[in-house]
Amino acid sequence: MRKKLLILLLCAVIVCTVTIGIVYADDPTAPSEDGGEATAELYTIEVGDATLTVDTHNLNMSITKGGRTWYSGRRHLGEDGEPDDGLQYNGSRITDGVTVTYRDASSVNKIQQTDSITNLADDPVRDFKKLDNGFDAKIRLKSNVGISFTVQVRFDGTHLVATVPSSSITETTDNMRLEQISLFPYFDGSYQQADGQIFVPDGSGALIDMSVRSNATQGYSQRIYGEDCSLSTPSARANEPERASLPVLATLYPDGGTTMIATGGAEYCRANASVSGIGQYPYNRAGFTFIYREPYTRYYDDSGDTSKSTYELQTERNEFDAQITYTLMDEGVNIADVAKVYRDSIDIKKSDITNVGMRLQFLMAENKPSMFGRTRVEMTTPEYVESVARDVSYYCNGLTVALTGYQKGGLGGADPSVFPMSGKSSYRSLGESLATFDVPLSYCVDYVRVHERASFSNGNLLQNISEQFIVLADNRAGSDVAFRVIKPSYSEKMLKSDVKKLEEFHAGIEATNVGSMLFSGYKSEAFSRTQLIADTVRMIGEAQLPVALSNPNAYMFGVLDSYVDTPVEYSAYLIETESVPFLQMVLGGSVPMYSELLNLDYTGAQLVLRLIDCNVYPSFILTEQDAIELYGTDSQGIFTSSFDVWKYSIRSTYEQVNEVLKEVVGQQITRRDKVASNVYVNTYSNGVKTVVNYSSAPYYYEGTLVEAMSAAAVR
């Protein structure tokens, strides 16, 4: 029977996953699937009130602490001790301590191959080294695969850290190439419907309910920090799913849970989550997969013709130390507890937040086709910006102003840096004037992408792995333009040049795509994603002026002064059941956070409540002229932007947000509770609670009446 299953498995498919682990039951020496006894030598570590037990043959673990047990993976067994989930042979994947994916690089189609550990190696774990606080175990696959590496596990009673050092990985065959490794992908998983939730880093944050059968046909899977545009062509739809900007997952049950953080190699990993009913496994799980190589399509010319291409796999392995830190959470764990664990593990630059803020972005000029080339379309003058800022600052003490499209020629085809600009003297006067009534001014820049119409040297553009210029579509509604990617070395040169000049303009910068687009470089400018992270953090950290970043990745939190274009929702994948302000729980009280441009998708009361719930300040894009003037430009997707049209809605929105959030300025969310259907309570570090009632009926909370579709602060 075992040979038949092996033959079927080897003939079947394309995705290859090598498993390392045993059939895990409550008893690690439970009968194996073929009826024989599973060999198990157990090693136990005691740290305080916690006990870790590992099978030295298969790296199957369990941790007991405070009356609860965490399993690295477990098959569900019936009363007779046999698996009753119908998975049979493939069930061994659920109990894996480690999962390895590899390819035969010599085959024409580079097809992945799949085997279970019983067929890959009789004794996969070699040189098991016992330590007082964990263990080291060398994994060696069978000789014709030729891949080996070391798994290091350290345990302090609360935190379990699993690492695969890059230096430990070897590939001894000519053809087999390591592609992916997953460490304990079913850690703290559960069987069938379970009373609990899984957190995934989608947008502001999302929860997946494990207690109900999902209607989804696929699980959650997103590349941390986004796809690499040097290896693939990312989609740029206006409704593109939110990027996973935080390397965090969590399982939350009534009796405890686990926070999982990719503390090493996050730039090369994917976050995964699934629940019972999706696919063939009746299990709930969350985990990370580390990517050592990626397949890609190599084109031989710029036509994009697939007949002139080959399917390739990265030759060189991505070099990084893969690491996951598991934090064991006690009974009654709350999503705010998970946020605190993550917040305490990273650097966050502290800003002085004294008032509820609002951000007004002004589009100064655009351009559109004319009989003789392109014509500049004037939309807003610096003098008008000053007058609006004065009016708004009478009721908003936290106003900030940003300018876009100020360059010669307007926004479409603009130079990616601040200078040259159109009418320097008037912009210098604007900065001086705004400074007199404490309104910060920023210039919007994009040091990562350049418009295809801009006058820009090809020598400063980045090429992908196929030695072609990278082309990215615009994600603005109504726009069909394309952008090219700038070499990071030239991006830094532009930033340094702008910084030298902007001080006299009394302004900072608001950077788009810096710290949110992560990619690698090849040929003329070779660098890894890891290196780009380090260079970008250093570049922004050395800028001697205020820097706002648009929806940045987590590695930028230690150097940014404010966060703009903050997501306040999730992508609403079918598997997800609830949006949570996790991102805001991490940054709230430390960094001012401003929403996406509200008048591009204004939904009234619902949107205002989301801002209050997430502790995010409103943003609007405005012009002096009517938006009809933008027809025929790249910004024609902006249907309404005139301040004269929006000034009453802007004031109303701010006053509603300010009425509640003024009570929690500079504070952190310490707990979040769902107290009724569509009614949420956030508790802040100063003891104030914000009650957000999304329902159609009034709700009483601690003696305070919160009307339908409204919010209130309760002391």
Image: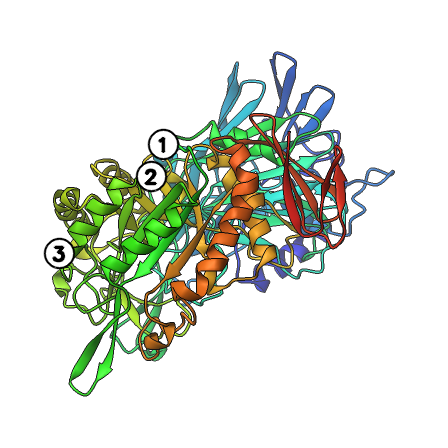
Residue drawn where x is 59% and y is 30% of the image:
337
Q: Position of residue 478 (x, y in %)?
A: 40, 74
| Residue 324 shown left or right of residue 461 in the figure | right
State the residue position of label 1: 349
Structural crowding at the residue carrying mark 1, measured as other residues with C-alpha within 10 Å and reported as few (<14), some (14–19) or many (≥20)? some
State the residue position of label 2: 560
State the residue position of label 3: 424
2 or 1: tag closer to the N-terminus: 1
Structural crowding at the residue carrying mark 2, measured as other residues with C-alpha within 10 Å and reported as few (<14), some (14–19) or many (≥20)? many
Q: Position of residue 136 (x, y in %)?
A: 48, 25
Q: Amino acid at mark 3?
A: Lys
Q: Amino acid at mark 2?
A: Leu
Residue 397 showing in the rendered view: yes
| Residue 261 shown left or right of residue 208 in the figure | left
Q: Secondary structure at mark 1?
A: loop
Residue 34 showing in the rendered view: no
Q: Position of residue 483 (x, y in %)?
A: 28, 66
How far apart are the two marked residues, 3 and 1, measured between alpha carbons?
32 Å
Q: Nearer the viewer, residue 207 or 424?
A: 424
Q: Give the mark toward the camera: 3 or 2.
A: 3
Q: Are marks 2 and 1 in contact (CB under 8 Å)?
A: yes
- Vertical placement of residue 509 versus 621, above or below: above
| Residue 381 shown left or right of residue 171 in the figure | left
Residue drawn where x is 22% and y is 40% of the image:
539
Most extreme residue toward the bottom, as rendered?
371
Q: Secondary structure at mark 2?
A: loop
| Residue 126 shown left or right of residue 676 in the figure | left
